Structure formats: structure tokens, C-alpha cells
Image (cartoon, coloured by chain):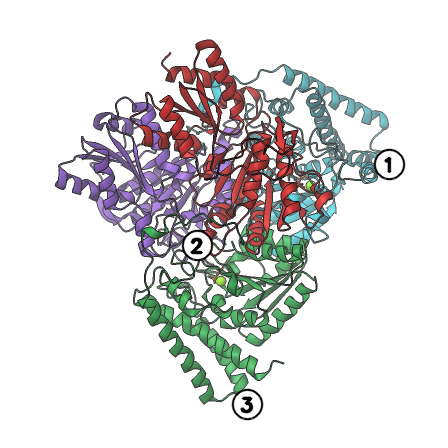
Chain colours: A cyan, B green, C red, D purple
Amino acid sequence: MLNTAKRKEMLRMMIKVRAFEEKLNDLYQKKAMFGNPHSYRGQEAIAVGVCSALEKEDLIASYHRGTGHIVAKGADLYRLMCECLGKLDGYSKGRGGKMHMGDLSFGFLGNTGTVGATVPFATGAALAAKIRRSREVAVGFMGDGAMNQGVVHEAMNFAGLWKLPVIYVIENNLYAMTVSMERSVAIKQLAERAAAYGFEGKSIDGNDAELVLDETQRAAEKARQGGGATLLECMTYRWDGHFGGEPGTGYRAREEIEEWKKRCPIMGLKQKLIAAGELTEAEYEKISAAVYAELEAVAARAVAAALPAAEAELDSVYAREAAHG
Amino acid sequence: MLNTAKRKEMLRMMIKVRAFEEKLNDLYQKKAMFGNPHSYRGQEAIAVGVCSALEKEDLIASYHRGTGHIVAKGADLYRLMCECLGKLDGYSKGRGGKMHMGDLSFGFLGNTGTVGATVPFATGAALAAKIRRSREVAVGFMGDGAMNQGVVHEAMNFAGLWKLPVIYVIENNLYAMTVSMERSVAIKQLAERAAAYGFEGKSIDGNDAELVLDETQRAAEKARQGGGATLLECMTYRWDGHFGGEPGTGYRAREEIEEWKKRCPIMGLKQKLIAAGELTEAEYEKISAAVYAELEAVAARAVAAALPAAEAELDSVYAREAAHG
Amino acid sequence: MAKPMEAAPATAAVKEMRLQEGIREALRHEMARDKRVFVMGEDVAMFGGAYGVTRGLLQEFGEQRVRDTPISEAGIVGLAIGAAINGMRPIVEIQFCDLLPLCMDQIVTHAARYYYQTGGRIPVPIVVRSKFGTRPGGGPSHSSCNHGAFIPFPGLKIIAPTTPADAKGLLLSAIRDPNPVLCFESHHLYGVKGPVPDGDYTVPIGLAAVRRAGKDLTIVTCGGMILKVEEAAERLKEKKQIDVEIIDLRTLAPLDKETILKSVAKTKRAMIVDEGPIVGGLVAELAAMIQENLFSDLKGPVVRVGAHHLPPPHSGPLVDAMVPGVERIEAEALRLLGS
Amino acid sequence: MAKPMEAAPATAAVKEMRLQEGIREALRHEMARDKRVFVMGEDVAMFGGAYGVTRGLLQEFGEQRVRDTPISEAGIVGLAIGAAINGMRPIVEIQFCDLLPLCMDQIVTHAARYYYQTGGRIPVPIVVRSKFGTRPGGGPSHSSCNHGAFIPFPGLKIIAPTTPADAKGLLLSAIRDPNPVLCFESHHLYGVKGPVPDGDYTVPIGLAAVRRAGKDLTIVTCGGMILKVEEAAERLKEKKQIDVEIIDLRTLAPLDKETILKSVAKTKRAMIVDEGPIVGGLVAELAAMIQENLFSDLKGPVVRVGAHHLPPPHSGPLVDAMVPGVERIEAEALRLLGS
Ligand SMILES: Cc1ncc(C[n+]2csc(CCOP(=O)(O)OP(=O)(O)O)c2C)c(N)n1
Ligand SMILES: Cc1ncc(C[n+]2csc(CCOP(=O)(O)OP(=O)(O)O)c2C)c(N)n1
Ligand SMILES: [Mg+2]
Ligand SMILES: [Mg+2]
């Protein structure tokens, strides 16, 4: 079992992930951001559980609902917030927005708004590790809806065939935008599909951060030993609408939403820690307050930051220097 | 069990399918055809078993190795041969060649040279039947290699989700061009993938025409009853090279080729019929001779047929009349 | 080619509605008229489409003919092709045109070539609707204008309605057309209102519309850019007494050369304004075609005004700099007119 | 931009080989020099590629770096992108360009935009090799020329070598380039022989080559068409004393405007000859660009000579009618020259 420090750090990180979403939504409501947020609230245990199991050199690929993964993998909150707001200080200089980023300095392969498109990136990153015998493991995050994209099928077949050190993490929040899983596939659990590619698939409680961490560690260990790919289907739920401005109630029953909110990943870990005498209410409040305060400061700076100069970026499309030095 | 007449008809059709391949290869060697043949020799039991199980209104979609399916579904040999030779009398007026045809008059949805691309056509044809409650069943033929195409994955998921009246027939001849199945997927049998889409998958001896017919009938019956899709993986082997001019020996052991030739689908059914006293050697020779004679006549006519006039076809790309009258 | 019905048939009643609703009118009208027509796409049924275009269709026509799909663009188009071959008239929605490359093979290699490659035996009457338009917050995967990228592929028809009435009339033509038709719907125009005739009428595919008559300069454009071009034309008139003739393509393939060349032959100066990339695509084809046909009449080069050759950016100022604005259109026009 | 190395470095020995082998030379040279380089594609390892380009690489570099793949074009390119992001230099073979639409999304929306959309943090140095060229027997799915269709998409570099020496030099530039590079290899040129210098040299991307000097007319072309254009030029010289200047683009994106415009400014007449479609694509961009820049110098319109706007047919006579032949090139040139 994990030591107290690690468990508290995971709790703190989940609060951070959620606080970021809440602050971003706040700025969105105030029309301070370009585009829409895709709230990660409710799914925090997955990003935090997975990233807490990884080592520094390990890599993740993300998708449209990516802010949670990016925060959990160790992004600088100010630069991330700036990117959401289209500011020059953003990771992508405001060019990409939160759906289009990437920075290897914290092991982030990148994300994009095209569902499923980055799954082969994680797979290819794992292929690179295999070819040059380096230790890193790659994680491909995706939503349940991505499992019906052709390129995801193709990528997973490669991973099984070549025993690549990759972990596929499906965040099954039961809906792809407004379409429920029952209306997208004819199987009970998406983890069943791993068998079609010749590797292990497992469906787990995605709201239990420690469980997610354990399973990720097992999968990463196996990958480093040459055991190949693993698919982890993490069952979870998105608390908010699909994106900002979409309430998420037109196609989901209020009871269902309430039911899932009772299984809050943060509250779950908090109660465990308190029950185990490793945390007090007061301590929790202190941690939480500190995180939210940090976000306030970050947001204030990001709002004040400069937008990119219109003309400056116009020939930014070709890389000049030889790649990787 | 099938009656003698039907069994003999299947035998005759398999000979016809093979004779067509042999005649086409002959013309190819003589440089009488444009492009290359993709010989179907060795796989005759699949095309004939499947098509013998279908009713007139049922539909098939084919692929690059399609001449066998086209003959078995009832194409006119002269027009098919003309198409191979790029003649104006061809089904596609010489525009498409044998890889690009389609004619609903004998239930042929069409084929194309893009591996896997017609699998969604069979699926969509089945969707049409479901929406308007018509009786026809659609068959999607494909090679083993097609199972790793994204669009095939997407189409099969639709079929499972919507319980469409479609039958997927994988002709698993163990190789995709020069790449063996072991070097393409990490599973033992491709039929296992049906589970990922929520319908039944079965791996059977693809060189036993009667077995193929039985399984196809079961699947078609089920489809007509609203039971949805079935995947039939028919294990078989291609006797010749991938296409004309490619010997097929650079990546396959001679022993393997010889082994499979011993399991000739035509000889198999012939022996059964003789053993059952339903056929004599002499009778067989008579049937065979008649078929080969027919092919000689067809080829002679096709060779003598006119090529399309160069300019005539230049604005043939848009359909003028409203579709379907 | 038949004369287009520019306005309501004298008899028909007219309703004011948004372009989005004009499209829906066409879908409803044809689904009621023709049992072969059905609609499928991501979130089109229960939710009524990401932009509300298909709202109410599920309730009116039922789940057999209005279908939510998994996230499988290539499969969606592929199934539509198969259903069309088997006698149906599928209409699919691809949520935005950045996703068209996912079904590119099915569209350009199969749907577009099927009629030709079957010797004219099998037409593929499908309609693929998608949204285009570059806007802040969309970013590189959600905000493209790739309408021009489909022009080099034979066998496709491509439309881009700019008024609610055209939207209904062009969609009806598209659904009834025996060929695959791509319909590009502008993000900038969904909300634009205008009169739409009741009942059955079509706007023929292949016919451009002269939106403003002028003698000094012809500006050819399509989709959302029409708004900026019209404003620029107003300014040029006010400030400099320049009379701009505006041609709204409405159909991108096949191009209405007759209307375009007639106008340029008159004004002797042509400018192409498009939200798509300045390199390749629509602006290139139009400029090349016009100078090929009217070289000796032209008083200046055919000028291309398009988006800078970049992925669509996320941040507002970057988008503003990339996409042609009224000022840029105005400035280019003045440059061309040498004033 | 650095001067291209048109010929062997004075020192280097020269070997006569086919274009196909020139490509292989580049792959071997760079795989030996740079451990990050690896090759994958359908049938490229054990079989040596559908056209033999990668023959022997498996034996020389082993199965880790030379990989046969399943039939998964989008996956192949997607994995290449991921491997490139993680520090490798993947070279993938897509068996023929008709299959590029299957990986269109990965190429144009992701590989091409990644550097931009990550704020310049992550380049994607991949090379996608594919065959183009229309020939009898290929038919609508196996015989396309869609090289021009990629021009509207920012972030890509596109090359099309026509000599064995260029093939080696351009491929070496492509593999070392930090951007995604599409390499179109002509079916008609694989077998063409020529001298190839030993050792390390590059032909820079972005530089066209003047293959024949002339004063009367500039013909811009690329890929397999070079053979027909050179023959037409010979005939025009013999029959009519017409001096044609031939520009072989070698790089389709970014275009070498300098070389093209310099030539046309001199000859005052330009013709674009391409195996791709006459509508849209490469011929349109070049015609539009040239008239935009040299309108007042031109003595006639920029003439486009391309394939008729059809899917590539199967039957010989149909292919001959569709693809520009020497006669058509010659006739168009005479028409443009008014003789
Ligand atoms: C390929 C593709 N198709 C459609 C869309 C539009 N879209 C954006 S998010 C989304 C739903 C994704 O669902 P899921 O993969 O389950 O992720 P979630 O949003 O639930 O986290 C859709 C359809 C897209 N971005 N990309
Ligand atoms: C999408 C696609 N990729 C690659 C090719 C080139 N190619 C033609 S046939 C073939 C092998 C097909 O193998 P399989 O599906 O098993 O059919 P078989 O030839 O064995 O009958 C390949 C790779 C193609 N035609 N289409
Ligand atoms: Mg989901
Ligand atoms: Mg096979």
C-alpha cells in the first residue's frame, strides 16, 4: 500500500486538477477564454492515478478533454492557463489552445481535437522506445468514443503485434458527447476489445485513484519487462456538460448525474485518509485552500498576460533547425 | 444434406471459377490484358459455397481478388472477361477493370482495389434493407489483411450495434501479399474479433464448399430473422502468386504450397460425390471439358472485342439521370 | 441548364428563418416526400446535431431514418455509400470539415468514382454535410476551410449555400442529385436570417449568383466570406465610387464558368476572395481559369485573397490576421484598381 | 538558400543506377549514418517493397529498423508521427498514392500542423514515400496522381525527384528535414538510369532545376511528365525552331517561385504540364501564381495542360486520352505561341 505522503500528494493533485477546471470555467463564463472548456471534473482519479504511477521519462498522449492529464503530468499552470486564454505565454504561444499542445519537458507527447488521433502517437512513441531499447513507457489516454475510430483499431493492432511498451487508458464516462455507450457499441465493456489485439484488457473503477495507480504500475512494469501493451478501461463520469455552455442534462438523467457525484474521486480518497487517521478535516481544508489560492493567482496573471502579436506568427509553420538538434 | 443436383452444380461452378482464372492468366501471359490478374485458384469453395447459399436478391461486395465471387454470383463471363481486357463490352466499359466493377442485376454491389474499402458498402446495403424492411442479406468478402483496416473496424461496429443483416466472409489465405498472418496480428484466429463487435464469429474450413454453404445459410437465415451480423473466417490458401508475374514463392515455403494444393476444394467435392456414387470420373471429365470449352469461346470473343474509343468517355464522370429512375 | 429559382415561386408563401433552418426545411421536406431519404451522423438524432440543424427530425421521422452514430467518420460515409448503392438516399453530417480527411478515401476514391468505374451502372447519391469556417477558439483541428481541397477530385459536386433560401433549394437539388454532393455550411452563416419559400423548389447545382452588380471589378467568393466582401464593396462605393460586382459561387464543383467569365469580361478585373488557404485550393483554380479564358480582356492580374498559409490558430488575434478581413479585401481591390 | 549540388562533388566517384536505386542509396546511407532512422511499410522488409525500393535493407539493418506492417495506412503514419515525436526519424512507404487519402488526417491535420500547434516545441520529422503515375491496368484505385491535392495544406514539404542523383540527394534532405516530407516517386521513372555520386550530398528542398534552356516558352512540370515534355521540346525545336525552357519543379511545396518567375520573365510565355488533374491541384497554383506576379510581362495566358478530369481508367486507350501526351503538349505550345 502507498505511504501517507504519496496518498496525500495524489489527493492534492486531484484537487489541483479540479480547481483548474473550475477556474477555467469561471474565466469561460466571463468570456475571458477563446473556445470552450471540456471539463474534466469527476474524472480526476484517472489522470492523477495514471500519472502518479509513471516515471519522469514516461510519456503521455492526451485528447480534447486533456487539461486534467496535462496538469497531472506536471505542466506549469500559468502556461497552461495562458494557452487556454490564447496568450503568447501559453505552451503553444496561443496557436493551439488547450486541445493542441505538446511539451516533452514534462513527458507530454501532445493532444489534438480529433478524437482518437493521438492514440497512434503514444503507440509510435512506444515503438521508438522498443527500437532503441530505452526504458520509457507511453500512455495513450482516450475517451470511450475513441474506440470506434479506425486509427485506434489500427494502432492497437500494432501494439499487440509488436509487443510495444504502451498503456491504453480509456476514460469511459459512458457518453461520447450526447451518445451513450449503449448506442455506440454492442458490447458490455470496451476492455473486451483488447483480446482482438492479443493483449490484456481490464475494466476498473476509474474513480479510485489508488486502484488506477496500482493497475498502471503493473502495466508499466510489464511493459518495461517486454510484456507489451495493456488496455485499462477506467469507468467514470463527467460531472459537467460535454463542453462549456452545454449543460449535459439533455441526454443524461439528473439522477444518474447525482448518483455519480456521490462517488466523487476526491471525497473518496479524502474519506479513506481520514478513516485511516492519515488526514484531518482541517488539514484537508488547508490543502484545498492553498490549491484554490494558487489557481486564483495563476488566473490573474494569465488574464493579464499579453495576446500574441497578429503578424508575428505568420511564418511559423515550418521548423527551421534540424529536428532534435 | 444437399441433393445431388445442387452438389454437382457447386462442383461445376468451382470448375468454372478456376477455369476463368486459368484462362485469364493465359491471356495475361500473352499480354492480352491490362494490369495483373489476382488469381483465385485454391479459394473456389468460398465464393461458390457462399453464393450458392444466397438468394437472387441477396447482395455481395467484393475486393481485388474478386473474379471468383463475380463468376460465382452469376456474372456473364464474356462481359467480365472483356472488362479484364479493357474492352468496351466489359461491365464497366473498360474503365474499371476487374477490380472496379458493380452490377445490381446479379446482386453485385461492387469491388475496388482499396483493401477493406467495400466492407462498409456491404454493411450500408444491409442498413438499407433494415430501414425499409426488405429481405435481402448483404455479404462482405474480404481478405485476412483487410481486418487491419480502420474502416473495416468501424463498419463491423455498426453492424453489431444496429444488428444489420450482413455476413462478413474473411478469406483467410494466411498472407496479405507477402506478409503472413503471424506478422500482421497477434491473435490465432481473426474470427475472435467478432466478439469485439458483439456478434458471432466462426472459423471454418474454407476449402469445403458444402460446409461454407451450410454456415452461410445459417448466417443468412439468422440475418433475415433480425439476428444481425455473422463473421465467417474461411481458412484457405492462394495457389498462385499475389498477382500475375509474382510467383508467390519468395515468402512461402514450397512444402506449404504443395500441402495446400493437396486440399484442393474441387478435388475434395469431386471425391465426395464419387464416393457417394453421385458422380463418375467420366461425368466429371465431361463437366470439366464443357466448362473449359466455354471459357475458350468466351476468351476468343473477348480478345476480338473492341477497345473503348479514346475520346468517347471523357464526360462520363457525373451521373445525369436522377438515381434509380 | 435550367434557370435557378432565385426567389419564391410567385404563389408560395414565404417564412423568415435562419440558414440553419433552411437546411432543416430541405431535410424535412424531402424526408416526407421520399422514403429513401434518411439522416445519420454523430449527435444528429437525440441532440439534433452539434449546431441544431437536424433538431426535431428524430421526433418527426423516427429512429429508423434519423440515426446517431458512433465516432466513425469513414464508416459513416462508407455505410452511406452502401445504402445508396442499395437504393437509399443517405444524408450524413460530418460535424466539421476538419474531419473530412478521416473519410477522404471513402469520398474521393469511392463515392466520387463509383459511377464512372462501374461503367455508369451504379450512381452513388449521397449528401455529405459539413461545417466550415475559421474562428477564434477552434484551433488547428476544429476550424479549417478545406472546401477547396476537394476540387481536384473528379466525380464530386460541391455546394456552399449563403442564404436560407439557397440553403433549402440547393440541399433539395443535392438530395435529388444522382451524384455524391458535399455541402459546406459556413459557421459564420448558420445564424443569418432571410426569407424562405414554402414548399418544393430547387436551386440548381452549378449556377452562381450575382449578389451585387458593378462595372469596375468582379469579386468571386463563397461561404462566409460573402459578408466581408459585401461590406468591402459598400466601403469601396462610398469612399471611391468603385462599383464592385459580387459573384457568390454557391456551387464550387462544377464551377459556373459562364457566369464568372461573363462578369469579368465586363469588368475586366477579377479578385477571388476565399476563407480557404491562399496556396492551392479554390482561389488558385478560379484565378487560373479566368486568366486562361480572358487573358486579353484583363486590365490586371487576377488577384487572390485567401487565408495565410497556416493551420487555423486558436487565439483571436492570430485568426484575425490569418483570415481575410474587410480591410484586406478593400486594400487589395484598390491595389488592383491602381488607385 | 544553399546552392544545390547538381552533380557529383568533384571528388566523389559516380555510379550508374536506376532512380529506384538512388532512393535506396539514400535510405542506406542515412540508416548507416543515423541510428534514429528506420523504415516501415507494407511488404518493405522481407519482400523489399512492392517496387523493390527497399530491397536488402532488412538484411543490412535488421528487423528492428526495417519493418513489414499490417495493412493500416493511417496507423503506419500515426505511429511514424509518434516515433518522430519521441526522437526517431521514420521513413514510411505508402504503396501508391491512391492510398494517401486513407492517412490524410494523420498527414494534413496532425503531422503537418504539429510544429505550429505546439508553439514550435515539437517538430515531426517523418518522410512518407509513395508512388504516383497513371498507367493502363491500374484503374481508379491504383493509378492516381494526387500530388497536387496536398499543396493547400500548410506545414508539408513535397518532393518529386526525376533523376537518380536527385532522388538520392532529395531523399537525404527529406530525411534530415525537421518537417514532414511527402516524396512522390513516379511509376514512369523508377527504371530511368543516371549517374549517382557516392557518399554524402544533398539536393536542397525548395529548389527547382532548369532542365533545358530556351527563350521562347517556359514549360513547368514535375515527375514522370518530364519525359514527355523533353520529347515535345525536341520536336518543337526540330520542326519549328522553338526554344523551350523546361523547369523541373523537384519540390512541389514550398514552390521555388524565384526560379520559375525568372524563367517566365525571360520567355514571357508559360505552360504548366502535369500528370495530375486539370482542375485544381498543381497546375492551378502555378498558373495563378505566375500571372499574379508577371501579368504585364506575359504575352499570353499561362496555359494548363493536365489530365482530363476523370478517375484514372483501366483500359489503355482511355488512359492515353486522359493523360497529356507529347502531341497534346506540342499542340498546346504551338497554340500559345500563336503559330
Ligand atoms: C474524429 C472526431 N469526430 C468527432 C468529433 C466531435 N467530437 C468532439 S468530442 C466528441 C465526443 C468524444 O467522446 P469520448 O471519446 O467518449 O470523449 P469524452 O468527450 O467523453 O471525454 C465528439 C463526437 C471530433 N472531435 N473528432
Ligand atoms: C488499403 C490498401 N493498402 C494496400 C494495398 C496494396 N495491396 C493490394 S492487395 C494487398 C494484400 C491484401 O491481402 P488480403 O487482404 O489478405 O487479400 P489477398 O490478396 O490475400 O486475397 C495489398 C497490401 C491496397 N490495395 N489497399
Ligand atoms: Mg466519453
Ligand atoms: Mg490474404
- Tell whether B223 sits left or right of B84: right
Q: Disc 1, disc 3: CB below 8 Å?
A: no
Amino acid carrying mark 1 in the image: Ala
Residue C289: percent from left, percent from top: 36, 33
| Callout in the foreground (1, 3) | 3
Which residue bears the numbered disc 2? C117
Which residue bears the numbered disc 1? A275
How far is mark 1 from mark 3, CA to CA? 82 Å
Amino acid carrying mark 3 in the image: Gly
Residue C258: percent from left, percent from top: 40, 33
Image quadrant where residue C279 sits: top left
Amino acid carrying mark 2 in the image: Gln
> Is residue A111 at least partly visible in the picture?
no
Answer few, some or many: residues within 10 Å of disc 2's Cα (few below 14, many 20 plus, some between 14 and 19). Answer: many
Per the image, label 3 sits on a secondary structure element best described as loop
Which residue bears the numbered disc 3? B277
| Callout in the foreground (2, 3) | 2
| Image quadrant in which the N terminus of chain D is located | top left
